[in-house]
Image (cartoon, rainbow, N blue to C red):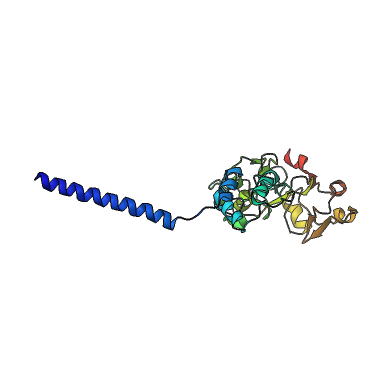
Amino acid sequence: MISGILIAAVIVGGTGLFIGIFLGLSEKKFAIEVDEREAAILNVLPGNNCGGCGYAGCSGLAAAIVNGEAEIGGCPVGGSAVAAQIGEIMGVSADAQDKKVAFVKCGGTCGTAINEYEYQGIEDCKMAALMQDGGPKGCAYGCLGFGSCVKACPFDAIHVVDGIAVVDKEACKACGKCIASCPKKLIEMIPYKQNTFVQCSSNEKGKSVMSVCKVGCIGCKLCERSCEFGAITVLNNLAHIDVEKCTNCGVCAEKCPRKIIMPRAVAES
């Protein structure tokens, strides 16, 4: 009886020892070598894992940079400071990157834009956009103000103020999650230093815009004609600013009869 127990113990112990040795040898034989630079890059990345870089978290971006699949400045949260550190690790120079922030192209607040009906569904822009005429707002291009972008932002950088989403540029990390969450495609990335913006996205003709919004762009082209730098053009009834040409002189904002071209400071107030 005792000998049987001893034999079983020896067999179990021997099997365990064999498996342990086998696994140890297998680990060495089939081990995947990790580039030391990958760990070093991961160490300097912010660790937000926001996905703004297009990869599944910071570890995914670190691996992509080492494999040459992503730029050293691929982290929108870290910006130029992190890019410089990664450049040192990779042995390449990091060109200075212009910081970017999100901007909402709609100025149709509760007091300036009309609603066609009262929406009583789930407080979510994507759900509201599925309703009649793309939501209750009279302007089919306007911000619905139900905060899908607010929920998507991991940095508390965007809030609904007076019926429209407004971005806090100091808190924004340019991760792009708000852009993906907006069913109206109203949010875009612009240079942090840019001070002049067209807070509208409607392509409707002037008469139609005026019937639903007191401030929407009517495509009058006064801004286009007043800009001596050729930085603003009207396409499809909507003014567009070329940030590469814009000097932030503010002339276009002064000439705009609808006052929809404005400095960020005004847009965020």
Asked if residue 263 is positioned above or below residue 239 in the image, the reply reads above
Residue lying at 74% horizontally and 45% vertically, measured from the top left? 192
**Farthest residue toward the left?**
1
Question: Can see residue 57?
Answer: no
* Residue that appears at 70% across and 39% down: 170
Residue toward you, 73 or 40 = 40
Residue 153 appears in which quarter of the rendering?
top right
Residue 173 higher or lower than 19, as above or below: above
- Please state, as top left, top right, bottom left or bottom right, where the N terminus lies in the image: top left
Residue 16 percent across, percent down from the top left: 27, 49
Which is more toward the observer, 44 or 239?
Answer: 44
Residue 20 seen: yes
Number of labels in the image equals 0
Q: Residue at x 87, y 54 (%)?
A: 222
Left or right: 19 as drawn, with respect to 87: left
Q: Is 119 left or right of 199, judged from the image as shown?
A: left
> Which x, y percent locates residue 79?
68, 46
Position in image of residue 76 (x %, y %): 65, 48
Quarter of the figure that contains the C terminus: top right
Q: Position of residue 32 (x, y in %)?
A: 48, 56
Horizontally, residue 52 falls left or right of residue 30, namely right
Residues 225 and 49: in front is 49
Q: From this viewpoint, which residue is outermost toward the top?
A: 269
